[in-house]
Amino acid sequence: MPAPEKSSVSITIRIQDGIARITLDRPPLNVLDVEMLRQLNGALRECDETSVRVVVLTSALPHAFSAGVEVRDHRAGRLDAMLSEVRENARLLLTLKPVTIAVIRGSTLGGGAEIALLCDLVLAADDTVFGFPEIKLGAFPPVAAACLPEMCGAPRAAAQAGLVTEVVPSGQLAETVDRIATDLAARSGVALRALTSATRAQRAPALLRRLDAAIATYRATVGPSDDAEEGINAFLEKRAPAWSHR
């Protein structure tokens, strides 16, 4: 188990009765900076044990799962570190032994929405705002670019497209996830691990190949571009961006 929570800790983990509950807790919107992504990936590695049958990813905040990756971490000096942690997060979620459940509510945007896409099940409160606004910053979401083509043949609502497993009233979200996680944790661990392995065996390698291609494109074209720097500056300065004409 991790050390007692400190002010710098944005991720907590509690493991009990075969269920690992990983909680994002960085007010006000669980923005994922490089350090928080590292903490999340460390917590996921702790869960990759046969004694853990279900991993629940949730938020301590009432109005947000995560508003996405820290904008400043898209700058050239931190871009490689950020993309490396995003790639490792995808690898972990696609290859963990336990069943993974994302419990989302409120702002679930960009990198936060991408985490949900990578989980086996997604339970969404009816106040969830799900989206990928990176293009407004002169960027794009690499995990979504890898995942969405296989999940959405055409633009559809999130539930219809299979992006979420179930939408429930916000007040019933905690009860619903507890019921589902407890039910799954009571099943045969051997059978659950075999099921996750079988269902991910073909999907994970293909998705990771597409993700690597998306990240390579990002590093080669978006990262060093003037538009990327302008998009970040405009966001931080709260003004409209002035894009290049290329």
Image (tube, grey):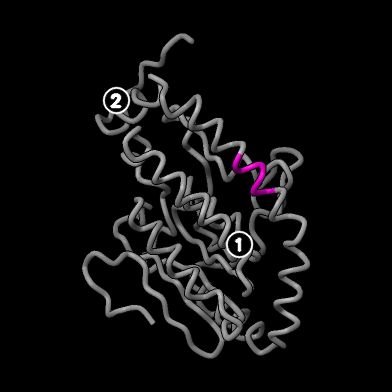
Q: Amino acid at mark 1?
A: Cys
Residue 98 spot, x, y in % from top left: 62, 75
Q: Which mark is residue 119?
A: 1
Residue at image mark 2: 239
Compared with residue 172, is residue 33 higher up or lower down, i.e. above or below? above
Compared with residue 62, is residue 191 higher up or lower down, i.e. above or below? below
Compared with residue 245, is residue 222 higher up or lower down, i.e. above or below? below
Residue 150 spot, x, y in % from top left: 74, 45
Q: Residue at x 51, y 57 (%)?
A: 89
The picture quadrant where one finds residue 162 is bottom right
Q: Residue at x 61, y 81 (%)?
A: 53
Q: Is residue 149 left or right of residue 124?
A: right
Q: Residue at x 48, y 50 (%)?
A: 86
Per the rendered image, the range of residues in magenta is 207-212
Residue 133 lies in the magenta stretch: no
SS of the residue under disc 2? loop
Residue found at the very far top of the displayed protein: 245
Which residue occupies the foreground of this view, 240 or 34? 34
Q: Main secondary structure of the magenta part?
A: helix
Which residue occupies the foreground of this view, 176 or 147? 147
Q: Residue at x 41, y 30 (%)?
A: 137
SS of the residue under disc 1? loop
